[in-house]
Image (cartoon, helix red, strand yellow):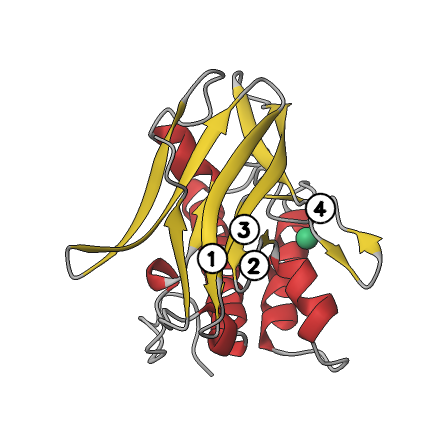
Amino acid sequence: MGGYGSGRTSSNIKAESCRSLEVNHLKRQGCLEAGRAGKWTWSRDGEVVAQIGFRTDEAQIVLDYRVRLYGGDWEAVTQYVPLVRIACNFGGQRPYFCCPGIVNGQSCGHRVGKLFAGGRYFLCRHCYSVAYGSQSEDRHDRMLRRANKLRMALGGEPGTAHFIASKPKGMWWRTYNRKRLEIEWCEDQATRAFIRKYSHLLSLDDSATLFETGAE
Ligand SMILES: [Zn+2]
């Protein structure tokens, strides 16, 4: 039984190689400021393998791209992703995507930090689980449950959309830091498990390639 910190998994699909959009990454690059527009690229071995156009306003980020699925024709897609900004305990705001997915007739709306491109649209992991998931609990769920238990034991709320609670009074810093690390490790493992499970949809398969639309 590997504990946290026991090193990288042997998965050959790295989180970084997926076509995913990470809200924090976009924020760091200034792409979530209203009025920003440009393109977002994915690279492999230093070469751009996919790119999409985006523009941001107060309430949303609009993704503009063309997609070709399984050798079919190129399709133009415009996807509107609402943004929510949640005030932090420690000041400032933290942005989230509001998942625009509609799966089995249900709109998703989960507040998430990450969207994955596994087909025509960028969707959150909940959508993939609903659309393709099995009923049985898998490693992904177990890891998230473990992380949530630890989060709540520290007095925080479950779910990666929340901050990890600050150190409870009377707890050693060393203990607290170890628990934080464990939470982060579990959540990272959950993401990796998710990516492994859906690698057939998320891998860099050239049968589904994204490009930006012609307009700059
Ligand atoms: Zn979703």
Depth order, front residue of 115/74: 74
Provide residue 145's location: percent of width, then percent of height.
Answer: 67, 64
Q: Nearer the viewer, mark 2 or mark 4?
A: 2
- Describe residue 105's horizontal placement relative to residue 47 as left or right: right
Q: Given contact means CB atoms under 8 Å apart, are the residues at marks 3 and 2 in contact? A: no
The correct choice, above or below, for 118 with respect to 61 in the image is below
Circle 2 — which element? loop
Measured Cα–Cα span from mark 3 to mark 2: 12 Å
Q: Confirm if mark 3 falls within 8 A of ligand 1.
A: yes
At which x and y percent is residue 89?
Answer: 59, 23
Instruction: Mark 1: give few (<14), some (14-19) or many (20+) Cα within 10 Å.
Output: many
**Callout 1, which amino acid?**
Val
Q: Earlier in the sequence, mark 4 or mark 3?
A: 4
Which one is earlier in the sequence, the residue at label 3 or at label 2? Answer: 3
State whether label 4 is within 8 Å of ligand 1.
yes
Placement of 35 over or under 41, stated as above or below: above
Q: What amino acid is labelled 4 in the image?
A: His
Q: CA distance from mark 3 to mark 1?
A: 16 Å
Classify mark 3: residues with Cα within 10 Å, few (<14), some (14-19) or many (20+): many
Could you tell which of marks 3 and 1 lies nearer the N-terminus?
1
Q: Which residue is labeled 4 in the image?
A: 110
Evaluate if marks 4 and 3 touch, with contact meaning CB atoms under 8 Å apart: no
Query: Are the residues flagged by discs 2 and 1 in contact, CB closer than 8 Å?
Result: yes
Q: Say whether disc 4 or disc 1 marks the residue closer to the N-terminus.
A: 1
The quadrant the C terminus occupies is: top left
- Left/right placement of residue 43 relative to residue 110 reads left
As drawn, the residue found furthest toward the front would be: 73
Task: Give the mark nearer the N terminus: 2 vs 1.
Answer: 1
Q: Which residue in the protein does label 1 denote?
A: 67
Instruction: List the residue tagged with mark 3.
Output: 115
Find disc 2 in the rendering and name its residue: 120
Query: At 55% across and 64% down in the image, what residue appears?
Result: 119
